[in-house]
Image: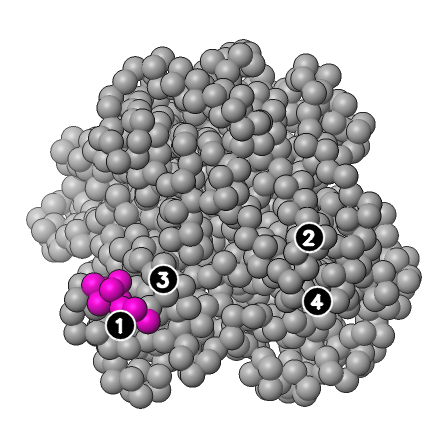
C-alpha cells in the first residue's frame, strides 16, 4: 500500500505530453465542475484533480491504467454505456457524471463479488485501516454480499513468507495485477505473472517459486502497489499500522530517493518511497526501503570513550570528558608540532551541514587546510575532469533526462546493483526503444535482462578505458560525425584543433587499439556511430571510470566525446557521474577538499578567502592541505599526528590496508565519530557516537545535484546529532560555533557559496527539493546545466593520451583483479551487514572465468588464495563467464574478504584517487584458508607487509 | 614522505601534461603541483632535487624540468 496520507490520482500524467511547453489543454465538466487538464489525461485523474475521487481498485497513479476491476465506471453525456474512467481519456466539452443510482448499483455488484471471495474480516487483518478494498466497501456501504460466503473461495490460500521483509497472503489477493504491473513497468524485473484464468487465476513469482528463490530483487514496488493486505511488509504485521509519516531522504546510494518514514510512537514501522519524490517518483530499492534496521541495531556504540594508547582498553566517559580530552590533545599537537600536524576527514554519509562544519572546524579552529573526504577514493577525478573541461564539478542532468535519451552509454557503472532506482528508469527508457552501449569488463545486468539488451557491449580489459574512449572519439572525428556548428559556437577553437589532430592519429583508431583494449574494432565503430548519430546521446559513468591511474583523463575523454557530438546542454544528453554514497556530491560541494572552499573555489584565491575570513573571523591558509593518502604518508614520517574522522571507515575503505593502519597506529590522537566501532576505531584514542539519518536534520545532495531534506524522526540515540558534536569540539577548542539548527548552517553556506545562494530550508520545504545552482538567475534551481553556454565559458577539449597503468600483469601475477558492488549490500557493509539483507549476500566471492579456474584446478565454491604485490586474502570462488578470461572480480562489503589488503597505492595522476579497479594478482586453490593465511604471513617470499584485511570502495 | 612515491606521482602528472601541453608541459606540471600539493610535499621533492639528485633517478624528463621550475618559482607559505 502506498504511503500513509498519499492522495492517489488513479492514473499517471499523460505520457510524452508533460514536457510540451505549453501542453495542449482540454476543458471538460465533471459533476458540474469545470476542469482543465493536459490532453491525454484520464477522466479518473481529471476528476481526482478536481477533488472528486472515483471509486477504483485496479488503478493507481504509478501504473498505466488497466481497466480490469470495473469499479471506476462513469456516465458521459451523449455516450452510451458506462466507460471505465481510468482508461478513458478526457475530451473537450465532455460532461461526466461520477455518481448516479445506476453507477452505484454497478459498483456495488462488483464489490459484492470481490467480498464473496474476500470476507471483510478487517478487524483482524494487519492491513486494517490502510486497505483500498476496505475503503471501497465502506464507501459503497457493502457489509455483506448477495452471493453469500459459501461458494468457492481462496480462504486458506498459501502464504509465502520467504522474503525477510514482506509476505504474500494469497487469501487476501483480489487479482488486480497491480503488483505484476509494478514489477514490470516500474521496477523492470518481470518477476511476477498472473497464472491461470478466471477463479483459478493467481499471482505467482517466476516459475511459481517462493519470492526469495524467484527473480525478485526485493525492491518492494509490488508491496507498495498492492491495494490490500495480500502483499504486506512484515514490519506492519509485527507492529501494526503507523500513526504518522515524516518525509526524508535515503541515506544509502547517490540516487537519493525520497521516502516517507512511517512511525508508531518512535518506532519506524516502514519506509515508503515518496511518489512526489523528484529523484525516485515513488520507486525504491531493497536497501532504502527495507534495510533501516541497523539504526536500532544492538551493535550501535552509544557511549563516548577514550584511551591513551590504542593498546589500552576503552573507557566509557561522559560527552564532556571525551570532547575535552580531544580538544586538549589537538591543542597540544598544534602547539608542539604546528597546525599542519592535524587534520580532519568529512563523510559522504553525513549531511551537507555536518560536512560543512567539519571543514570549517579544520580550516578555522585547527588552522590548517588538511581536510579531505572519502570522495577522494571515489569521484575526485570527476570533480577535476569536469571542472577543467566544462567548468563545473558535477553531473549535467536530472535523472528524468534519461527519458529523453535516444542512445545511452553506461561506462564503468553497474546501475542495477549500485543505483537500482536509476537503473529502473534506464530500463523503462530502453523498453521505449532507446539504444544502449555498455562499456565494462564484466557482463553487468544491463547487458541482458528481461525485455532489454545492450546493443553493444564493449568488454574492455580493465585499465584501458582511455584507449576505448579515444577510439570512440577517433571514429567520430574520422567519419565526420562531429557537430561542427555546436563546437564552433560553444568550444575553444584552439583546444578543439589540437584535440582533433591528436584523436585523428591512426594510433587512436579502433583497429590500432584493439590489441590494447581487447574490444573488436567493429564493435567500437558501431558504438561510436550509434552514439554520435542519435538525436540525444547521454553518458552515465561510475567508479569504473574514476578509480584508475588515468581516472581524470577518462573523465576528460568522456567530456571531449560529449562536446564533439553536441551532447551537452539540453535534456536527454549530458555527462552524468553516478555517485556511490548518498552525499558524495554534497560533501564535495561543501568544501571538503584540501585545496578548495565550498563551491569549488581554490584556497589561493584572495577574494574568496577574504570572504570566508570575514565571515569566520580568522585568518585562513592559502596553500592546499594534505589529501587522505598524503595524510597517511605524513603520519608515517611523523609530521602528521592528529585526525578527526567523522562517519568514515578509512581503515577498511582505503587501499593497501597495511599502509593505512600503520599510519593510523603512528598517530597520537585519532578521534572517530561513527555509528559503530568500525575498523578505524581500532586505531582511535577517542570514540564519539554518531547519529543515523533518522536522528538528524539536514540535507543531502544526490548525483543530480539535488538538495533534499533529511528530517529527524527520533531523538539521537547517543544524545547529539553529528553536527552538534562538531560544534561541541569547536567550542572546546576555543572557536565558538553556535548554531541552533542546521537551517542556520545552510544559511551560512548560502551566504558563502554562489551556487547555493538561493537555498533555504523554507524553500526546500516548499519545493520538495532543489538542484543547484540555485541563485538569482535560477531561483528554483537548475535541472540541466550548460544550457546555451558552458559554465567555464567555452568548453575546453583536452588531449587524452592513453598511458598504461604501471600495475602490470606478469608471470607471477597473471590475473587482473577488479572490484564492484552488489545490490543488497552497501559500501563497507557496516549498515547493510546489520540487516536481513545478508540473506542475499553473506560473504564476498571471487568471480573467475571457467578457463582460468580450470587451469588452476579451482572449482565453484572452492577457497581461493589471492596474492598481489602488496598483500593477500582468501575468498570463495564463483566460476562464471560474467568475467572474461584473465580478469577476476570481487565485491568489498565484508571486512573478512580482505580485498583492500591486496589493492595497491597506485592512484589517479591528478587527484590521487586510488586505482582500485586494476590489481595484478594470482589465484590458487586453498584447502584450509586459515592455514594458508598463516603461511602467507610467515612466508619470507611474501611481501613484507602482507596482512589480511579488506577491499573497499569500488 | 617517501620520495619514490612523490616521484611516481610527478611522473604520472607529467605523462598527462606531456600529451596535453607539449612544450609547456613542465610549466603545467609545476602549476599543478603548486595548486594541489601540500607545501611539505613540494618542499621535499625540491629539496631532493637540490641535495640528493640520485633519489630522483626515476623522475621523467618532463617531471625533472617541472621540479626545477617549481624550485625556482615556489616559496610555499606554511
Ligand atoms: S497481490 Fe495485491 S496487487 Fe497483486 S494482484 Fe493481489 S491484490 Fe492485486
Ligand atoms: S519486490 Fe520488486 S522485484 Fe520483487 S516481485 Fe515485487 S516488484 Fe518485482
Ligand atoms: S539505496 Fe539508492 S536506489 Fe535504493 S532506495 Fe536508497 S537512494 Fe534509492
Ligand atoms: S480502476 Fe478503472 S477498471 Fe479498475
Q: Position of residue A100 (x, y in %)?
A: 43, 35
Q: Which residue is mark 1?
A: A864
Q: In which quadrant is the N terminus of chain A drawn?
A: top left
Q: Within the magenta stretch, is there residue A577?
A: no
Badge number at residue B60: 4
Q: Nearer the viewer, mark 1 or mark 2?
A: 2
Q: The disc numbered 2 marks a residue on which chain?
A: B
> Residues under labels 1 and 3: Cα distance?
21 Å
Q: Nearer the viewer, mark 1 or mark 3?
A: 3
What residue does disc 3 label?
A: A944
Q: CA distance from mark 3 to mark 2?
A: 30 Å
Q: Residues within 10 Å of mark 1 (few under 14, many from 20)?
A: many
Same subunit under labels 3 and 2? no
Q: Secondary structure at mark 2?
A: helix
Whole-percent x and y of residue A171?
17, 50
Using the numbered discs, state the Cα–Cα distance from disc 3 to disc 4 in whole angstroms. Answer: 28 Å
Residue B40 in percent (x, y) is at 63, 41
Foreground mark, 4 or 2, reads 2
> Could you say whether the residue bearing mark 4 is in a helix, strand or loop?
loop
What residue is drawn where x is 69% and y is 29%?
A621
* Of the image marks 4 and 2, the number of the one nearer the N terminus: 2
Amino acid at each position: 500500500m502506498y504511503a500513509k496520507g498519499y492522495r492517489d490520482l488513479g492514473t499517471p500524467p499523460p505520457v510524452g505530453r508533460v514536457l510540451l511547453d505549453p501542453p495542449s489543454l482540454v476543458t471538460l465538466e465533471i459533476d458540474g465542475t469545470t476542469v482543465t487538464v493536459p490532453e491525454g489525461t484520464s477522466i479518473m485523474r481529471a476528476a481526482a484533480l478536481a477533488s472528486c475521487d472515483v471509486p477504483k481498485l485496479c488503478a493507481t497513479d504509478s501504473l498505466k491504467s488497466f481497466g480490469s476491476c470495473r469499479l471506476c465506471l462513469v456516465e458521459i453525456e451523449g455516450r452510451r454505456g458506462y466507460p471505465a474512467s481510468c482508461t478513458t481519456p478526457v475530451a473537450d466539452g465532455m460532461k461526466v457524471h461520477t455518481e448516479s443510482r445506476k453507477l452505484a448499483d454497478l459498483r456495488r455488484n462488483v464489490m459484492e463479488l470481490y467480498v464473496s471471495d474476500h470476507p471483510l474480516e478487517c478487524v483482524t487483518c494487519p492491513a486494517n485501516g490502510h486497505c483500498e478494498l476496505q475503503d471501497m466497501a465502506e464507501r459503497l456501504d457493502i457489509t455483506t454480499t448477495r452471493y453469500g460466503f459459501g461458494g468457492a473461495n481462496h480462504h486458506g490460500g498459501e502464504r509465502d513468507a520467504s522474503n525477510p521483509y514482506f509476505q504474500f497472503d494469497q487469501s487476501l489477493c483480489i487479482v488486480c495485477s497491480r503488483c505484476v504491473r509494478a514489477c514490470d513497468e516500474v521496477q523492470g524485473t518481470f518477476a511476477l505473472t498472473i497464472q491461470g484464468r478466471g477463479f483459478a487465476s493467481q499471482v505467482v513469482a517466476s516459475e511459481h517459486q517462493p519470492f526469495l528463490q524467484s527473480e525478485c530483487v526485493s525492491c518492494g514496488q509490488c508491496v507498495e502497489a498492492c491495494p490490500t493486505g495480500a502483499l504486506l511488509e512484515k514490519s506492519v504485521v509485527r507492529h501494526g499500522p503507523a500513526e504518522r509519516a515524516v518525509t526524508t531522504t535515503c541515506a544509502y546510494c547517490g540516487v537519493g530517493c525520497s521516502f516517507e518514514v512511517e512511525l508508531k510512537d518512535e518506532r519506524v514501522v516502514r519506509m515508503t518511497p515518496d511518489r512526489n519524490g523528484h529523484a525516485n517518483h515513488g520507486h525504491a530499492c531493497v536497501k532504502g526501503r527495507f534495510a533501516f534496521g541497523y539504526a536500532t541495531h544492538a551493535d550501535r556504540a552509544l557511549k563516548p570513550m577514550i584511551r591513551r594508547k590504542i593498546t589500552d582498553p576503552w573507557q566509557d566517559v561522559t560527552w564532556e570528558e571525551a570532547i575535552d580530552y580531544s580538544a586538549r590533545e589537538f591543542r597540544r599537537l598544534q602547539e608542539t608540532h604546528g597546525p599542519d600536524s592535524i587534520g580532519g576527514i568529512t563523510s559522504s554519509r553525513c549531511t551537507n551541514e555536518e560536512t560543512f562544519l567539519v571543514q570549517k572546524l579544520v580550516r578555522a579552529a585547527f588552522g590548517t587546510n588538511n581536510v579531505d573526504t572519502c570522495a577522494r577514493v571515489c569521484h575526485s577525478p570527476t570533480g577535476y575532469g569536469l571542472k577543467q573541461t566544462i567548468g563545473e564539478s558535477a553531473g549535467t542532468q536530472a535523472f528524468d533526462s534519461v527519458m529523453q535519451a535516444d542512445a545511452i552509454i553506461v561506462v564503468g557503472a553497474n546501475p542495477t546493483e549500485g543505483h537500482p532506482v536509476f537503473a529502473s528508469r534506464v530500463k523503462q527508457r530502453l523498453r521505449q526503444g532507446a539504444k544502449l552501449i555498455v562499456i565494462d569488463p564484466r557482463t553487468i545486468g544491463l547487458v541482458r535482462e528481461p525485455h532489454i539488451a545492450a546493443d553493444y557491449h564493449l568488454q574492455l580489459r580493465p585499465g584501458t578505458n582511455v584507449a576505448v574512449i579515444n577510439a570512440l572519439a577517433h571514429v567520430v572525428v574520422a567519419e565526420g560525425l562531429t557537430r561542427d556548428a555546436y563546437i564552433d559556437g560553444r568550444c575553444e577553437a584552439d583546444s578543439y584543433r589540437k584535440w582533433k589532430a591528436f584523436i585523428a592519429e591512426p594510433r587512436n583508431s579502433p583497429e590500432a587499439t584493439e590489441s590494447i583494449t581487447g574490444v573488436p574494432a567493429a564493435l567500437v565503430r558501431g558504438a561510436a556511430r550509434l552514439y554520435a548519430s542519435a538525436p540525444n546521446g547521454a553518458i552515465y559513468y561510475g567508479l569504473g571510470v574514476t578509480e584508475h591511474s588515468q581516472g581524470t583523463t577518462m573523465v576528460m575523454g568522456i567530456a571531449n566525446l560529449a562536446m564533439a557530438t553536441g551532447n551537452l546542454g539540453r535534456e536527454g544528453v549530458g555527462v552524468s557521474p553516478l555517485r556511490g554514497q548518498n552525499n558524495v556530491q554534497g560533501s564535495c560541494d561543501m568544501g571538503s577538499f584540501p585545496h578548495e572552499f565550498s563551491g569549488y573555489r581554490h584556497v589561493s584565491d584572495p577574494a574568496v578567502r577574504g570572504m570566508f575570513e570575514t565571515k569566520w573571523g580568522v585568518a585562513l591558509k592559502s596553500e592546499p592541505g594534505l589529501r587522505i593518502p598524503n595524510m597517511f604518508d605524513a603520519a608515517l614520517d611523523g609530521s602528521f599526528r592528529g585526525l578527526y574522522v567523522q562517519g568514515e571507515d578509512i581503515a577498511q575503505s582505503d587501499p593497501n590496508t597495511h599502509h593505512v593502519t600503520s599510519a593510523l597506529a603512528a598517530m597520537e590522537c585519532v578521534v572517530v565519530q561513527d555509528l559503530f566501532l568500525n575498523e578505524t576505531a581500532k586505531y582511535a584514542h577517542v570514540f564519539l557516537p554518531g547519529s543515523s539519518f533518522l536522528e538528524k536534520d539536514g540535507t543531502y545532495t544526490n548525483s543530480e545535484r539535488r538538495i533534499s531534506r533529511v528530517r529527524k524522526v527520533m531523538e539521537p540515540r547517543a544524545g547529539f546529532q553529528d553536527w552538534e558534536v562538531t560544534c561541541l569540539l569547536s567550542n572546546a577548542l576555543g572557536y565558538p560555533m553556535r548554531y541552533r539548527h542546521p537551517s542556520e548552517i545552510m544559511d551560512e553556506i548560502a551566504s558563502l557559496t554562489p551556487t547555493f545562494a538561493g537555498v533555504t530550508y523554507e524553500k526546500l520545504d516548499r519545493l520538495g527539493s532543489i538542484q543547484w545552482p540555485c541563485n538569482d538567475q535560477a531561483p528554483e534551481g537548475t535541472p540541466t546545466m550548460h544550457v546555451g553556454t558552458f559554465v567555464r565559458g567555452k568548453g575546453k577539449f583536452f588531449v587524452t593520451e592513453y598511458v598504461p597503468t604501471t600495475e602490470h600483469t606478469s608471470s607471477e601475477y597473471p590475473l587482473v583483479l577488479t572490484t564492484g558492488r552488489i545490490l543488497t549490500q552497501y559500501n563497507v557493509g557496516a549498515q547493510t551487514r546489520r540487516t536481513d539483507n545478508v540473506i542475499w549476500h553473506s560473504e564476498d566471492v571471487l568471480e573467475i572465468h571457467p578457463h582460468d579456474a580450470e587451469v588452476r584446478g579451482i572449482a565453484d565454491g572452492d577457497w581461493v588464495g589471492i596474492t598481489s604485490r602488496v598483500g593477500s586474502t582468501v575468498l570463495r570462488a564463483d566460476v562464471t563467464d560474467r568475467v572474461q578470461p584473465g580478469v577476476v572480480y570481487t565485491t568489498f562489503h565484508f571486512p573478512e574478504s580482505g580485498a583492500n589488503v591486496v589493492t595497491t597505492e597506485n592512484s589517479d595522476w591528478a587527484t590521487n584517487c586510488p586505482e582500485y579497479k586494476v590489481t595484478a594478482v594470482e589465484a590458487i586453490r586453498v584447502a584450509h584458508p586459515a592455514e594458508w593465511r598463516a603461511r602467507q604471513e610467515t612466508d619470507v617470499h611474501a611481501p613484507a607487509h602482507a596482512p589480511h584485511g579488506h577491499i573497499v570502495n569500488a | 614522505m617517501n620520495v619514490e612515491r612523490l616521484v611516481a606521482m610527478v611522473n604520472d602528472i607529467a605523462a598527462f601534461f606531456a600529451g596535453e601541453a607539449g612544450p609547456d608541459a613542465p610549466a603545467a606540471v609545476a602549476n599543478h603541483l603548486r595548486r594541489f600539493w601540500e607545501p611539505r610535499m613540494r618542499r621535499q621533492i625540491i629539496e631532493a632535487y637540490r641535495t640528493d639528485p640520485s633519489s630522483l633517478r626515476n623522475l621523467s624528463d618532463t617531471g625533472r624540468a617541472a621540479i626545477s621550475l617549481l624550485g625556482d618559482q615556489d616559496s610555499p607559505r606554511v
